[in-house]
Image (spheres, rainbow, N blue to C red):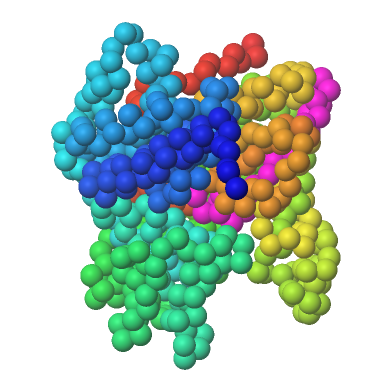
Amino acid sequence: MQHHRTETHDTWLEREALAEAMIPLIGRLYRENNVVTSIHGRSLINKSTMNILKAHRFARRITTEELRLEDTAPLLQLLADLDLGAAAIDIGRLRFAYDRSGDGRTLEEFVRAELADIVGHGGRDERTSTDVVLYGFGRIGRLVARLLIEKAGGGHGLRLRAVVVRRGSDNDLAKRASLLRRDSVHGPFEGTIQVDEASNTITANGIRIQVIYSDDPGSIDYEAYGIHDAIVVDNTGRWRDADGLSQHLKSRGVAKVLLTAPGKGALKNIVHGINHHAIEDTDRIITAASCTTNAITPVLKAVNDRFGVIHGHVETVHSFTNDQNLIDNFHRGDRRGRSAALNMVLTETGAATAVAKALPELAGKLTGSSIRVPTPDVSIAILNLTLEHGTTKDEVNTYLREMSLHSGMRKQVDYIDSPEVVSTDFVGSRRTGIVDGLATIADGTYLVLYVWYDNEFGYSCQVVRVLEEMAAVHPPSYPVADLDVAVAAVP
């Protein structure tokens, strides 16, 4: 039988071949030069041919045209030939900048000028290394571990050194490693994991993680394990105030503490992209707020900056969490004792009021409540807002889409207008809130927005971003030139 290939299929095979050829270049830049490459915020590290093709197609949302591999392949080769120093380089934005403002220069002339500070630096990384300890190894702890391992690169920046847990069984170490290796929601770990029972260590993609068994945050000698000036990420939720969390600072080898939950009292609640500039070197304890606060605050800031928010109500439809019971049983919280797998459970949320800690201009303007539902991950927040300045559905959607693509909050806010998306489509999203444009309701000063969020993974990405701010280990990012599209504010 004779097989016929269509022109479309031939084109696909050519694009596939180009994507395959990019993989070793991406890996070489990462391993030898500490260069992390991405396309409009989508990391290319350790990605498959298909992932690379999808990332190029994703570019349509930014420039209205699919990014051509014929344009990015020579750009990647050029980056590899320039023997760069450590950096984060968005090749989608860099190519867009060249196409828009190349000024008749060749691609090499443009790139050499844009990356002049790191050309010929041979992988040199000016960042110091900061040790990180995960206190607790639950849903957020394990996802933060995956992200830190993914970002390990040449060993600079954040270094995951240890995990602290209470011993749960004789084969505790093997069980912990298995939970890191397999995840029912987020899929298998990308890489290899080895367990050494003799030394109580888990080695993941070459990163050696010491497992320490303790129930006392103030009595651990981290320095005995070679850990110094570490940031402890407390993801147990057991302590929420300065007094409780300061116990970590009594342990040798600890410099700072980050809580992965809303803090109480005067602790700084940080939502990256909003108030991370408030982090100071002298801060010993800060918090990364909650998943819902991280999801809604950037969207609320965008809306308030342009249209003004008089008041509003936030209703979250939230996936159940480990805090609830699988079947009916005693629970100290109201309603949470009823089966999470069988019921919608009306409960409270402090996210609406917590927004004000990161965005003081909204203090006293928001109320909130939550409904827990029988899904394991991904939630949606419904923002019912009264505005100072009226708008239309098209205007507010266009504005939020631009904010998701061309603003300082593009790592936090995303936008989608597909009529077919459902909650599972957002599992693994690295943005903290995705505006569902088709669901937007706008009638003058009355506005309702629907914001999806992966309450586990998206939040964990924010935790790592806050960690990088605390440790001051952000690599230089390119292109430096601001490509943001200006969006006029309402007078």
Out of 470 and 111, give the one closest to the viewer: 111
Q: Residue most toward the front? A: 1
In this rendering, the answer to whether 370 lies above or below 329 is: above
Give the x, y percent position of residue 482.
41, 21
Q: Does residue 89 appear left or right of residue 435 in this picture? A: left
Give the x, y percent position of residue 360.
59, 36
Q: Does residue 337 appear left or right of residue 484 in this picture? A: right
Give the x, y percent position of residue 440.
77, 31
Q: Residue at x 69, y 62 (%)?
A: 376
Q: Does residue 103 appear left or right of residue 11 in this picture? A: left
Q: Residue most toward the top? A: 104
Is 211 within the magenta?
Answer: no
Give the x, y percent position of residue 286.
45, 53
Q: Residue at x 64, y 48 (%)?
A: 426
- Magenta stretch: give its range: 440-461
Q: Residue at x 64, y 39 (%)?
A: 434
Is 446 within the magenta?
Answer: yes
